[in-house]
Amino acid sequence: MSAGEKLRLGVLGSGKGSNLDAIFRGIHEFHLPAEVKVVASDVRDAGILAIGRSHRAHSKYVYPGESRAKLDPDSERNMVNLLQQEHVELVVLAGFMRIVGPQLLAAFPRRIINIHPSLLPKHRGLRAWEQALAAGDSVAGCTVHYVDEGVDTGDIIAQAEVDVLPGDTAESLHARIQEAEHALYPEVIGFFARERPFAG
Ligand code: GRF
């Protein structure tokens, strides 16, 4: 990759894909020097695949295998092959609901990032905004971090805070956090695209 080329992204998700949508907006409206080479999901009818297709990105369901928490080894190999065929330089997890396994980590060392809806290291795991409400936090937010073998444990790259307001419900707080995600993720990807902070 040389300076001036667009950063080649592979985006993995299991859900509705609002962060992918924000990344496309960053590319189309704010000239983020990146391109989405492939969108992959472990959920056949995930909204993220429909968003990928609507932007004419290569969008593919990858059969996850029998395990619930991760991809089976064969499936993980298929995912690695798909990303490598597209010469992906940065793997962007956007609501990918499985633990990333050793084949992906080995194929993309320090090149897999995730966005999590809390101010890590607080509130790892599922429905983090509910954890923030239950804890009585006055500030919540989101974190972009490198992915390692743990769950939401990798080195933190960037965070954005949002206030928890009186009367907030899980839904209203989650919506505010997602709005912050949609600004933060494209910003971080822009940083990767311009600075190329990759080893080797
Ligand atoms: C985001 O809230 C992100 O923090 C979490 O999964 C959600 C994905 O949402 N990891 P979407 O599919 O991008 O709308």
Image (cartoon, helix red, strand yellow):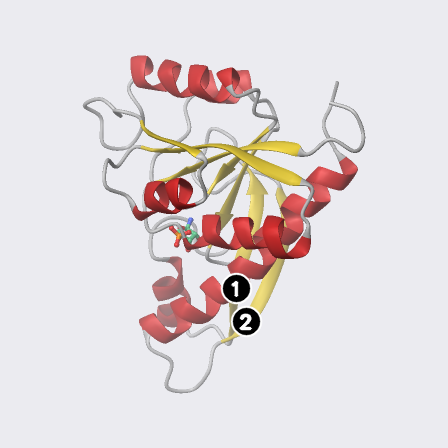
* Amino acid marked by disc 1: Gly
What label does residue 159 carry, if any?
Answer: none
* Amino acid marked by disc 2: Val
Of residue 1 and residue 14, the one placed in the foreground of this image is 1
Given the current orientation, which residue lies at the most extreme bottom position? Answer: 166
Of residue 88 and residue 200, the one placed in the foreground of this image is 88
Quarter of the image for the C terminus: give it.
Answer: top right
Residue wearing tag 2 = 162
Look at the picture and state if 23 lies above or below 109: below
Residue drawn at point x = 51 percent, y = 40 percent = 153
Tell me whether circle 2 and circle 1 mark residues in contact (CB < 8 Å).
Answer: yes
What label does residue 141 carry, if any?
Answer: 1
Residue 165 spot, x, y in % from top left = 46, 83
Quarter of the image for the N terminus: give it.
Answer: top right
- Count up the numbered dots: 2
In three-dimensional space, the C-alpha distance between marks 2 and 1, rounded to whole angstroms, equals 5 Å
| Residue 119 visible here | no
Residue 154 spot, x, y in % from top left = 55, 38
Residue drawn at point x = 60 percent, y = 51 percent = 28
Residue 78: quadrant of the picture: top left
Residue 131: quadrant of the picture: bottom left
Residue drawn at point x = 58 percent, y = 60 percent = 183
Given the current orientation, which residue lies at the most extreme left position? Answer: 66
